[in-house]
């Protein structure tokens, strides 16, 4: 199971996915509270029991409300004790996950973990929420980058198969490699106005092994996916590269403004 880390006021706090939901380690969070404390100390509080009970009623159709009412009736009394595992067993709760062992610990759904953070201190809760938001924004940025790259691959097999079937068999091995690179640059020139090598030469500060497509916006990548499929068909139809690059540029110049629907400048080659 994938585990992520947050650093909150110098404390490393783990985040795991359970049933596609984010759960935060209460065991790790406890390290920020001075003295010997356990999650069970927090569960003794009547307000805590009411909060996690309401949360379960909202999110858990199988929650044992009758057992919850019994627990709530004695919560806050001097002799009241409740462990996380007992809470799970008695109420069929889903807001906590508890496991023993070296890599175990107690995790709670982020909603409950934020409430637990308030018990540690208001300041800790603020930093906890802030760091969790940063973590999620970082994840989203990574997903968007992956989606953008996947768009360029949607029709890639059509494109390369068309080259292989209609151009590659006629050339030497050395020429085959050249044609693959050249066909990729047909698309680059038609859409961006320059080859991959020209872009790298003009952008020496960019990360190594990246290209213009890694920095293209989503609209350009959508058009590029369409161009790959169109170019594959034109190759099969036997059109010359000169004819294809003109048609691809015309296609890009037509589609991109429709997608963008703004007055932003467009990175298109002006092929006459």
Image (cartoon, rainbow, N blue to C red):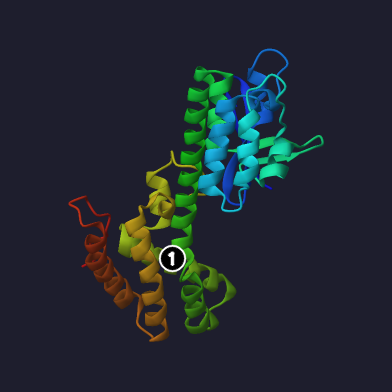
The residue closer to the viewer here, 217 or 59, is 59
Q: Is residue 193 above or below residue 17?
A: below
- Looking at the image, which residue sits at the far top? 35
Q: Where is residue 28 shown, x and y percent of the image?
A: 67, 27
- How many numbered callouts? 1
Q: Quadrant of residue 239?
A: bottom left
Q: Nearer the viewer, residue 105 or 270?
A: 105
Q: Residue at x 81, y 34 (%)?
A: 102
Q: Is residue 252 visible?
A: yes
Residue 98 placement (x, y as % from top left): 72, 39
Depth check: 79 or 170 in front? 79
Secondary structure type for disc 1: helix
Name the image quarter holding the C terminus: bottom left
Q: Measured along the vertical axis of the image, is residue 84 above or below residue 234?
A: above
Query: Residue at coordinates 36% horizontally, 70% vertically from top-left?
Result: 227
Percent position of residue 119, x then y: 57, 21
Q: Quick check: can you spot residue 3? A: no
- Against 76, residue 163 (above or below) is below
Disc 1 crowd rating (10 Å Cα; few below 14, some 14-19, many 20+) is some
User: Does residue 149 appear left or right of residue 10 in this picture?
Assistant: left
Q: Nearer the viewer, residue 20 or 136?
A: 20
**Farthest residue, direction bottom:** 237
Judge left or right: residue 102 versus residue 214. right
Residue situated furthest left in the rendering: 263
The x, y position of residue 216, in whole percent, is 37, 52
Q: Residue at x 51, y 73 (%)?
A: 157
Above or below residue 96? Residue 236 is below
Residue 192 image-quadrant placement: bottom left
Residue designated by label 1? 184
């Amino acid at each position: 199971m994938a585990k992520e880390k947050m650093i909150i006021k110098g404390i490393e706090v783990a985040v795991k996915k359970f049933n596609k939901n984010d759960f935060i380690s209460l065991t790790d969070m406890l390290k920020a509270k001075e003295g010997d404390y356990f999650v069970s100390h927090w569960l003794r509080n009547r307000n805590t029991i009411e909060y996690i009970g309401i949360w379960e009623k909202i999110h858990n159709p199988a929650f044992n409300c009758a057992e919850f009412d019994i627990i709530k009736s004695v919560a806050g009394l001097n002799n009241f004790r409740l462990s996380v595992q007992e809470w799970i067993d008695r109420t069929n709760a889903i807001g906590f996950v508890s496991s023993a062992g070296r890599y175990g610990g107690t995790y709670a759904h982020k909603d409950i973990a934020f409430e637990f953070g308030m018990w540690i201190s208001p300041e800790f809760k603020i930093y906890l929420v802030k760091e969790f938001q940063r973590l999620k924004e970082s994840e989203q940025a990574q997903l968007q980058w992956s989606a953008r790259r996947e768009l360029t691959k949607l029709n890639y097999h059509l494109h390369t198969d068309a080259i292989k079937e209609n151009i590659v068999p006629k050339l030497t091995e050395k020429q085959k490699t050249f044609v693959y690179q050249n066909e990729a640059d047909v698309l680059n020139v038609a859409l961006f106005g320059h080859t991959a090598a020209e872009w790298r030469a003009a952008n020496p500060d960019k990360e190594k092994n990246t290209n213009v497509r890694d920095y293209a916006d989503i609209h350009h990548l959508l058009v590029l996916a369409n161009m790959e499929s169109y170019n594959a068909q034109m190759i099969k139809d036997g059109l010359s590269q000169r004819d294809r690059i003109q048609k691809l540029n015309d296609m890009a110049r037509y589609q991109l403004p429709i997608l963008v629907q703004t007055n932003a400048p467009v990175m298109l080659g002006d092929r006459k």
